């Protein structure tokens, strides 16, 4: 009978194998328990055959044939050793739990833990403790599950088993119904993203409105958040922020800022038809609010004529500038541009010492480089002072000119300093309470120093003759006309682009006609990500966050995925409910497990890079 059972089992005929062993047992589980079956013959000299008790084999065959009750009864027969008995009980408990008896499964597993611990089978003990906690949670025995997990935590620390301590620690701070594998999976996924961009995401989330926020501060805060989101690579938040900022700029009638915002939005939305259409509408509305551009047939017939006209006016202005230059005498005779001399002189006055050199403010009209050696700084200062004194200037030019260009150099220097401060803040991912005020000041300077703005245009004509001012006005008028023409062309292009984007967004709507635009796979993923993001923002939940994370992974949007991961972890590991010491211990454990010195789960010293 035993040989028939072996032959049937070897042929994978589990039914015949089970019948053969049942005939052999003759109703006695003890007889099966005492019979050892060779399941695998030795493959080399000195190797022992692989044997198992006929009872274990019979139980496996019965389970495979769907008779879990009979298999469960057999497995509760004590084995030859306490260790084998604990292993049998573990299998029997799994069958009990599958049969809807988690309470009995937990009790049987608890008895088995003591058997395994007595034999110092720590690996089996840890596995049995995990099983017992799972069964207790299924049976709604929350207090019993907490006690079991504490025992699991103590055993892992005793064995210095970091890999085992981590899920036990997570289970201790997670809600009693949470599976430790879920937060562990989320933390494993979040960890590399947290190191790359977690601090910047903290800064971005921290840029929330305050109750006393003024309209100007709100625009500045949103602009600062846009910069952080762009640096972070969080495209969805970036485009949301740009839309909010555009709305506020429209309400506050900030046309200059709206132009800047809508240009950014159109650029950042590329590759996502859903976002592109939204940005297109905002940009289109801005352009339609401007005075109507009066076009003519000659523009269509000879578009290059406008280029030629602009080049002609630029050459005329360059020639007029040379005629407008002032003469200086000894010791530096020659002709000089008055705005260039006045700005370079102001830049030298505001220069700052830096590492043995002098750093000058950025130049608009000036020709001196940004950095000068100490010797070159002294030479240029003396030269320009002598040049300025020998120039033929009116009393008004000599009195008002230096102050006006010092103000220009100061504005350029301050804008540059604010940009550098923001770059430093982004590098260290830290923003203090004055960041929004600095951004508001930067926006004001950016508008004041607009190349097409009144300040720079007025200074460009400082000290010019009537003929020179007329030449400059003609050039500026042509530049303004060209800018209006380009925006008119942009508006016309939008009328063509809009139906193509609509066509892409209606890709799932049946159409009898061939579509003019085909939705690319990358664009489809981008649309799905935006829809998932909007759903997550509208109704944040575990389901919407999980869907957002999956799509962010597919489109390689790490910052978006990190946002979803953080939300999911906050649901699983609520803040303020866990023992702070345990949380701190878990954080240290995470760092050490990820260090290069950690091998096999032991707690080695932390990495020097941490």
Image (cartoon, helix red, strand yellow):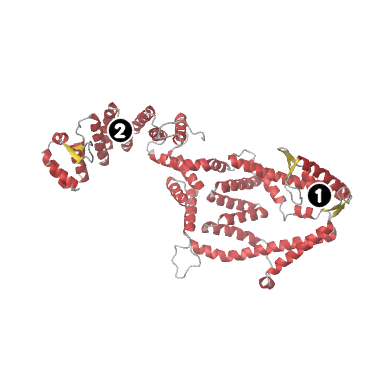
Q: Secondary structure at mark 1?
A: helix
Q: Is residue 268 above or below residue 109?
A: below
Which callout, 2 or 1, points at the residue further toward the start of the chain?
2
The percent position of residue 22, horizontal first and vertical second, equals 13, 41
Q: Is residue 269 above or below residue 118?
A: below
Q: Residue at x 22, y 45 (%)?
A: 64
218 or 516: nearer the viewer: 516
Q: Which mark is residue 341?
A: 1
Packing grade of label 1 (10 A; few <14, some 14-19, many >=20) is many
Q: Is residue 118 visible?
A: yes
The percent position of residue 482, horizontal first and vertical second, equals 70, 63
Q: CA distance from mark 2 to mark 1?
A: 85 Å
Q: Secondary structure at mark 2?
A: helix
Q: Is residue 9 left or right of residue 171?
A: left
Q: Is residue 5 left or right of residue 149?
A: left
The percent position of residue 593, horizontal first and vertical second, equals 44, 35
The quadrant of the picture occupied by the N terminus is: top left
Q: Residue at x 66, y 71 (%)?
A: 300
Q: Which mark is residue 124?
A: 2
Q: Which mark is residue 439?
A: none
Q: Quadrant of residue 463?
A: bottom right
Q: Is residue 477 left or right of residue 134?
A: right
49 or 447: nearer the viewer: 49
């Amino acid at each position: 009978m035993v040989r028939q059972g072996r032959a049937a089992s070897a042929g994978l005929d589990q039914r015949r194998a089970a019948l053969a062993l049942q005939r052999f047992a003759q109703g006695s589980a003890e007889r099966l328990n005492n019979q050892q079956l060779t399941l695998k013959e030795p493959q080399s000299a000195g190797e022992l055959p692989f044997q198992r008790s006929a009872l274990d084999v019979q139980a496996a065959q019965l389970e495979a044939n769907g008779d879990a009750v009979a298999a469960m009864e057999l497995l509760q027969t004590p084995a030859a050793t306490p260790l084998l008995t604990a292993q049998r009980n573990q299998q029997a408990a799994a069958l009990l739990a599958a049969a809807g008896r988690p309470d009995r499964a937990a009790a049987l597993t608890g008895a088995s833990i003591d058997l395994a611990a007595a034999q110092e089978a720590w690996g089996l003990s840890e596995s049995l403790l995990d099983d017992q906690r799972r069964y207790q949670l299924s049976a709604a025995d929350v207090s019993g599950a907490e006690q079991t997990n504490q025992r699991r935590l103590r055993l892992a620390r005793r064995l210095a088993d970091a890999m085992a301590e981590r899920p036990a620690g997570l289970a201790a701070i997670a809600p009693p119904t949470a599976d430790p594998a879920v937060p562990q999976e989320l933390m494993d996924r979040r960890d590399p993203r947290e190191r790359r961009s977690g601090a910047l995401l903290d800064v971005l989330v921290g840029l929330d409105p305050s109750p006393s926020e003024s309209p100007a501060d709100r625009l500045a805060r949103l602009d600062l958040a846009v910069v952080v989101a762009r640096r972070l690579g969080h495209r969805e938040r970036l485009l949301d922020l740009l839309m909010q900022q555009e709305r506020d700029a429209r309400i506050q009638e900030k046309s200059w800022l709206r132009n800047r915002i809508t240009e950014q939005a159109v650029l950042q939305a590329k590759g996502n038809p859903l976002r592109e259409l939204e940005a297109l509408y905002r940009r289109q509305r801005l352009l339609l609010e401007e005075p109507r551009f009066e076009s003519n047939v000659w523009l269509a017939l000879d578009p290059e004529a406008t280029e030629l006209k602009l080049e002609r006016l630029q050459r005329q202005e360059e020639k007029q500038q040379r005629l407008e230059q002032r003469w200086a005498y000894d010791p530096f005779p020659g002709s000089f541009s008055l705005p260039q001399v006045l700005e370079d002189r102001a830049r030298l006055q505001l220069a700052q010492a830096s590492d043995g050199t002098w750093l000058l403010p950025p130049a608009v009209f000036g020709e001196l480089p940004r950095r000068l050696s100490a010797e070159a700084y002294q030479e240029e200062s003396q030269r320009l002072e002598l040049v300025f004194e020998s120039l033929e200037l009116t009393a008004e030019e000599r009195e008002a000119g230096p102050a006006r260009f010092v103000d220009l150099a100061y504005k350029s220097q301050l804008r540059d300093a604010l940009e550098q401060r923001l770059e430093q803040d982004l590098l260290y991912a830290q923003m203090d309470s004055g960041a929004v005020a600095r951004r508001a000041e930067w926006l004001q300077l950016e508008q004041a120093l607009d190349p097409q703005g009144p300040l720079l245009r007025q200074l460009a004509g400082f000290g010019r003759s009537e003929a020179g001012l007329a030449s400059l006005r003609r050039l500026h008028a042509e530049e303004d006309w060209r800018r209006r023409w380009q925006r008119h062309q942009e508006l016309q292009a939008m009328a063509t682009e809009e139906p193509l984007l609509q066509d892409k967004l209606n890709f799932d709507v049946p159409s009898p006609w061939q579509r003019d635009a085909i939705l690319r796979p990358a664009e489809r993923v981008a649309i799905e990500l935006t829809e998932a993001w909007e759903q997550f923002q509208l109704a944040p939940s575990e389901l919407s966050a999980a869907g957002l994370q999956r799509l962010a992974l597919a489109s390689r949007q790490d910052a978006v995925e990190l946002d979803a991961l953080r939300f999911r972890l906050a649901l699983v590991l609520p803040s303020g409910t866990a023992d702070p010491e345990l949380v701190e211990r878990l954080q240290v454990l995470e760092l050490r497990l990820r260090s290069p010195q950690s091998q096999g789960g032991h707690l080695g010293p932390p990495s020097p890079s941490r």
